[in-house]
Amino acid sequence: MAAPAKTAAPKAAPKKAPAPKASAKAATASTGKGAGTNAAVDIQPILNQQNHAPAPTQRYGTVSQRLPIGLDEATRQKSVTMLNQLLADTITLRDMYKKHHWQVVGPTFYQLHLLYDKHYEEQATLVDTIAERIQILGGVAVAMAHDVAELTSLPRIPRDREEAPIQVSRLLSAHQSILKNCHDYAKKADDSGDDGTNDLIVSDLMRTNEMQVWFVSEHVVDSPLTRAE
Ligand SMILES: [Fe+2]
């Protein structure tokens, strides 16, 4: 409640409430900004703060115990390390799908163009699921392309446009590599008692990757198109 200023309450004054303008002026006076100040100055963004950044809120590679999820630090650390590897590899596979979506040629263009994009979207969903699990565990998720390039276990592929069977072969090789890690990591997460990570790896990563392997593999079966041989 805005109390009228003591000095503005002479005995002779009627019961009238203070005029809104007067209290607005009082408020302005209390901020120390006089009439004529350009209000636009107050909404200027403070730019380039990264040039004087304080220490980061959390360093990559560390694991905090912020969230009470019933797991000890050693378990979290192990899971975060495994999940960051899967994250880097999944980001790489996701981007490989988009590359091939753009560059595919040949009689199966339409089929593969659409399929690659579907798989890209599914891999993008996995990326988010893995990254958020890392954050829940108290870790820091790897994110940027240059960091992913350093961390991924998948081999670098050429920038060049390649034939569809080569694209498919590269994708199947990447899926296989990720799935092998999934089997290994799921077991380790189970052994250390991190059921949530075990479930994510089995239910999300393994199921999605296995399904995609099926859909992609059937494109490189050398079967007749119109007449049985
Ligand atoms: Fe597209």
Image (spheres, helix red, strand yellow):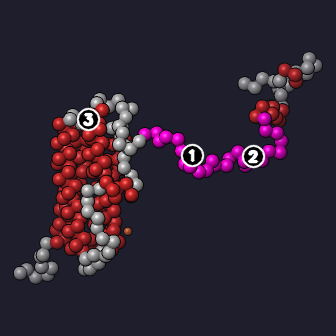
**What residue is shown at x 10% (from left), y 82% (from top)?**
227
Residue pointed to by mark 2: 39
Q: Callout 3: helix, strand or loop?
A: helix
Say left or right for 43 vs 106: right
State which quadrant residue 21 falls in.
top right
Three-letter code, disc 2: Ala
Residue 8 location (% of width, % of height): 88, 24
Q: Is mark 2 within 8 Å of ligand 1?
A: no
User: Range of the magenta residues?
Assistant: 32-58
Quadrant (top left, top right, bottom left, bottom right) of the C terminus: bottom left
Q: Callout 2: helix, strand or loop?
A: helix
**What residue is shown at x 26% (from left), y 59% (from top)?**
154
Residue pointed to by mark 3: 75
Three-letter code, disc 3: Thr
Residue pointed to by mark 1: 52
Q: Give the number of callouts.
A: 3
Three-letter code, disc 1: His
State which quadrant residue 167 falls in.
bottom left
In the rendered image, residue 42 lying in the magenta stretch gets the answer yes
| Crowdedness near tag 1: few (<14), some (14–19) or many (≥20) residues, C-alpha within 10 Å | few
| Crowdedness near tag 3: few (<14), some (14–19) or many (≥20) residues, C-alpha within 10 Å | some
